[in-house]
Amino acid sequence: MNRHGRQRLFKPETLAWFAMPPLLLQCLTLNWSAALTWPTYALLICALLKLWRCSKPFDRRLAALLQLLSAGLLASQLQGLLATILQLIAVSAAFAGLLGHELGGMLSVRALLRRSLQLLLAALPLALVLFLFVPRIAPLWTTELGPVRGAVTGLSSDLDPLSIERLATVNASAARVSVPDGEALPTTAYWRVLVHEQFDGRSWQHRDPPFSRQPYRGLLNESEISQWWVIEPSSTRAVPWDGRSKPAAKDQWVTSEGELMVGAASRQKRSFRLRKGTDAMRWQLRPPFDSERKHPPASLPRLKQLGARFRSLPTDQERLQAIERWFKNQPFRYSLNPGPITDLDNFLFENQVGFCGHYASAFAALMRSADVPARVVSGYLGGRQINPLTGSPYLELRQSDAHAWVEVWLEGTGWQQVDPTLWADRNAFDNGNQGQQRTKLTWSDRANWSPGRLGQWLQGQWWGLDMAWTRWWLGLNQSSQQNWLQALLGTQQKWLGLFVVLACTASLSLGLLMVQLRLGSHQPLEQSLRLLADFGVTPLPGDTFSDLCRRAAAAHPDRNQLLGAMAHHHQVLTHASLNSHQRREHLREWWRIQRELGSPS
Amino acid sequence: MRSAELTLGLRNLYIIPSRFGALWLGSAALLLLVAIQTTSNSTLLLAFVMLALLLLAMFLTHDTLQGLCLRCGEPSPTFAAESATYPLLIESRHRRPPLRLRFRKASDSAHVQLSAGVTLVGLSWRPEHRGWQQPPQLQIETIAPLGLFICWTRWNPQTPQLIWPRRRRGPVLEQHPPRWRDGLDEWNDLRPVREGERPAVVDWAGVAKGRPLQAKVFTVPDDVERMLKPAAGVPIEQAREHLADRIWTLQQRGERYGLRLQSKTLSPGRGLQHRNACLEALATE
């Protein structure tokens, strides 16, 4: 198809349609139960209808504005690298569509795209000044934005291993965490998510804590950051953490049970940072609630009887050690496929085969029977270290790394972590699907290459980029802004307002200059006309370019030859049938003549 | 103030945000609020980019009109109560985004996209009265390149346009030369007699010779002259409108005619120049 044919096919007005696919793609990843999802859907449907049925010029403008608004709402919900790229494409296309409509076919599609990009770039200096230097403010109000419904894989608030004959081993990604450069990734750490403190004899339930606005915690230095997290959609507001780090933002807080909550939780990908924690956290020293002391129900007589045997021991520590010895002396065997287990009595005294949920449930119930407060914690264990070609190494947690363990209250030391699964017969593991058992992937080993592994490797590389982007982009927050303002203005912060006004003026001037420079280039004919105007010759109605050149040559006989050559090249470029190489040659010659004409004689 | 030429600049250009600009600003504010609530950097940057584009658009919209030089053309005469075209010469040193020109109170507007050089633009308006008429106030406006601001200026072009009296069919007093009369033998054809035909035009000689009843068709000789005068008993303004229509018709038929008004007489003639002179006399005398 020739050039004109392409231009007919892609009219400038059609550019607005190119914004829709990236926006719709992102909408597919939104969860319908999040607060901003429905406004985003509504805006996008309105934009679609406006584009489809636009009868007035205002409709087209409105469609572009709705597309920009949708992109903005999506940007607030999806902050990953891919989502950001899609948002950038959508914003550029929407803006080009608006420009194409307003310029009324004045430019070709390519010129229009270039022009819209130039305008966006011209606006960028001012936008960056505002973005970097206008003081950020904290959220004006906080609401319970977290969803309550919706299907996503991941940890559940109810832990009921007895109803599962075979543990599902979903290999989907759960989270990714990176640490400051130079620090080792904790590949054997326990990442706690949910605390299940209520036991009904069969399952352990998690109690969702009431939402509470947290007090301001002060600003954060970049050096204080110890972990950067990216969490895949999950059904809980609680997010994985190591139990020691401290929240780094106002919308994060630690509950009295030791769960880390993120205020802006939703069933979408979330990112957050944590800072280093050195001293013990308050949750570790919080005395147990009654619900955490409650004995198992009478439906578990053998378990209660066994637990009662340990009550005679004087201290909690001794009871713990005695129960640990009891577990280790029994022929417990670890299996992801334990078969039907009727209750914990059946597991402890007959079957004795199970996975982490069985061990944690049974051990916690036994500890409570022995009058030691205990609760079950679910989260992730270990993770897989990925070393991407770009970005820093990171730890990847998959859903199959999900794990359950126990916390017991020991007088004088507080809540202590115990993992009874480790006491099972380690040699009898029927597969290596537990996090700490998995070998590290060695991509250098060629024997490991296969299409599936290659896909995993590529995904790991992409996530590495995503992680690096998230670390950098999330790092530009209120506290880092305070840091660079401190570095820039020192103690003279009172002059910030004046500084911002001056910087805005300068950046706006720079933007205008960029637009003006653009007007002065790229169009040979227009530049030639400007040049001829400098020679004192302006076009009159009916004038051809050759007539203009002749008039200019008459006024400036010393430039006669150059002006004649310029007229010749214009004639050839306009009327002759040229291939692309010849066109380039003539254009190059045209530019050369213009430079010569522009230079002082 | 009326002038023959106007160069657009800071002193005569006005600019305010358009309705779409207000919506744009509201949307940016909404995104700013969402960005604060969700602590989203991408949304915050987009909100600031929209604000920056708004500020940039103010200057760019102003630049669309700044530097334009407007001059009055030579307007052609036209009839009252009909669409008149007023020519404007617009000089620009470079290509400009689209802009709109219209006379105030006129329904039609011209959307023009100027190239470098001088562009002739014809603007339509509808004069109601005869004579040398000043066109209404001209408004030049643009919202390009982003539709966020509307920039405009108003100008009263100085050059008047001649407006002939409105064309209206009606009685006109015509004085024919004495040799052109019914009943003479200066006929060149015969046609069937229509009902109510005057007996003077019937070919009685042919009837006497046994031919059917036929009417004579007369040829108006090339040099037949007629003088047009306002019909008696008709108000003078209305009579002028009848005369304008009659002159236009006669000119189209290529006939010779003259015009006699109370204060001016134009001897018979034909051609555009004569027609224009007659119509101008009707418009201005």
Image (cartoon, helix red, strand yellow):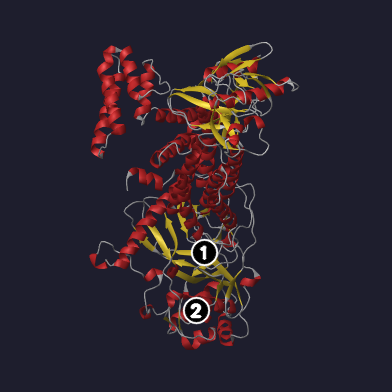
Label at residue A234: 1
Q: Do labels 1 and 2 share a chain?
A: yes
Q: Is residue A5 above or below residue B117?
A: below
Identified at 64% across, 68% down, the residue is A289
Disc 2 chain ID: A
Give how far across and how far down residue A336 sits, in percent. Answer: 43, 79
Disc 1 chain ID: A
Q: How many labels does the image show?
A: 2
- Considering the image in quadrants, where does the C terminus of chain A appear? top left
Q: Which residue lies furthest to the right in this view?
A: B233
Q: What residue type is labelled 2?
A: His
Give how far across and how far down residue A138 sits, in percent. Answer: 59, 45
For label 2, the residue is: A358
Closer to us: B20 or B195: B195
Binning the other alpha carbons within 10 Å of mark 1 as few (below 14), some (14 to 19) or many (20 upward) gives many
- Circle nearer the N terminus (1, 2): 1
Q: Which residue lies furthest to the front in this view?
A: B209
Identified at 40% across, 30% down, the residue is A518
Give how far across and how far down residue A55 sits, in percent. Answer: 57, 47
